[in-house]
Image (cartoon, coloured by chain):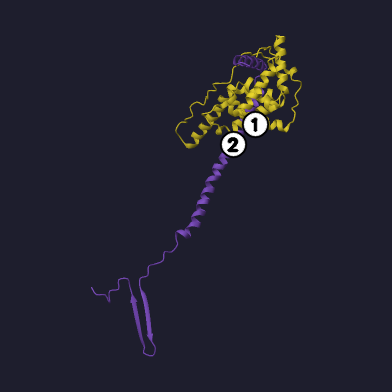
Chain colours: A purple, B yellow
Amino acid sequence: MTESNRIDIDERIAALVRSVHAEVPAELEERIRTAARNEERKLRARQRVLRWSLIPAAAAALVLGVFLASPVAHRPVPREIAEIRTEFEIPGKDIKIVFFQKPDFKLFQED
Amino acid sequence: MKDGILTLAGPVVGGWAPAIGARNADPGPAEQAKDIDQATEKDAFWDLLSPCRDKLFNYIRKTLRFSTAAEDIYQETVLNAFRYFRTFRRDKDFAPWIFAIAHNALRDHLRREARTSAGPLVERLGDEDDSRTRELVGEIFAYAERLRPRHREVFFLFYDSGFSIAEIAGVTGLREGNIKLILNQARNSLKAALGVTHD
């Protein structure tokens, strides 16, 4: 079948197929538009409910998060060791020897 | 409404110009802007549907052999398209997109109903003045009726809706080679009826 034959047949079939043609009935069109409007209204209502329920839910989640995170945030930082203290007691002599060790302990240091 | 309107030079699908229009809402509260945007979106949908509405309806009717279920399938298609319009990419043509939705609806319907309950097809055709034309139309639709549903879809997408082979592949998910084969079979089967004798 040549290209021109093919085009000729296609055009003739298309014309005959399209000769049976109907428009969308007006009542069907109206029914669809009404259904679409209703669906849109429902969707908007659902979105509104979702939007208003989302704010308290987000706030509650935030409070819960802060509550759960607070022990982590306020974990006590260990203090630096300021001094090391060593005590000796000589039994029966009523003598107590105390050593203080500090980072900048200057007592036995020579300048 | 009458089935037998002879429109031998029916408009072809093509140039589905997106008539989306200006979508920029006036600056204002976010809520107001959103409402305006939704309204524009809704208008854009109906504007885009308008030029392909009748073609879509006829494609469904003819694929379902003029069954009364065609109106339900058409409604289902349009509502589904309306529902998922946000997913439609504006740089694409609207017609293949909505026809693909119709194709899915038809496929589901045909799966549910092994055989649609339509009356004799030829009786539903119009009353063309020319008896030869009437006869030819009858032969073509009788041929289409004998086709498998998927082949019938391809036949009507090409000859009735005016889609190209590439577009039909996009709508139906069939390979272009298969579509060409279906169309060639149709040409070969109908050329004698059309009076084409030369090869």
The amino acid beneath tag 2 is Leu
Residue drawn 50% across the image and 53% down it: A63
x, y percentage for residue B90? 52, 29
| Residue at the extreme left | A111
Residue picked out by circle 1: B104
x, y percentage for residue B102? 64, 29
| Residue at the extreme top | B130
Res A97 → quadrant: bottom left
Q: Are marks 1 and 2 in contact (CB under 8 Å)?
A: no
- Position of B179 relative to B194 (above/below): below
Asked whether, in this view, residue B23 is left or right of residue B107, the answer is left
Residue B103 in view? yes
Residue drawn 51% across the image and 32% down it: B37
Q: Nearer the viewer, residue B125 or A97?
A: B125
Residue picked out by circle 2: A43
Q: Nearer the viewer, residue A3 or B161?
A: A3
Residue B57 in view? no
Subunit bearing disc 2: A
Structural crowding at the residue carrying mark 1, measured as other residues with C-alpha within 10 Å and reported as few (<14), some (14–19) or many (≥20): some
Residue drawn 68% across the image and 22% down it: B62
Q: Nearer the viewer, mark 1 or mark 2?
A: 1
Viewport quadrant of the C terminus of chain B: top right
**Mark 1: secondary structure:** helix
The amino acid beneath tag 1 is Asn
Res B8 → quadrant: top right
- Answer yes or no: are tags 1 and 2 on the same subunit: no
Q: Nearer the viewer, residue A2 or B105?
A: A2
- Position of B187 relative to A54 (above/below): above
Asked whether, in this view, residue B120 is left or right of residue A78, the answer is right
Structural crowding at the residue carrying mark 2, measured as other residues with C-alpha within 10 Å and reported as few (<14), some (14–19) or many (≥20): few
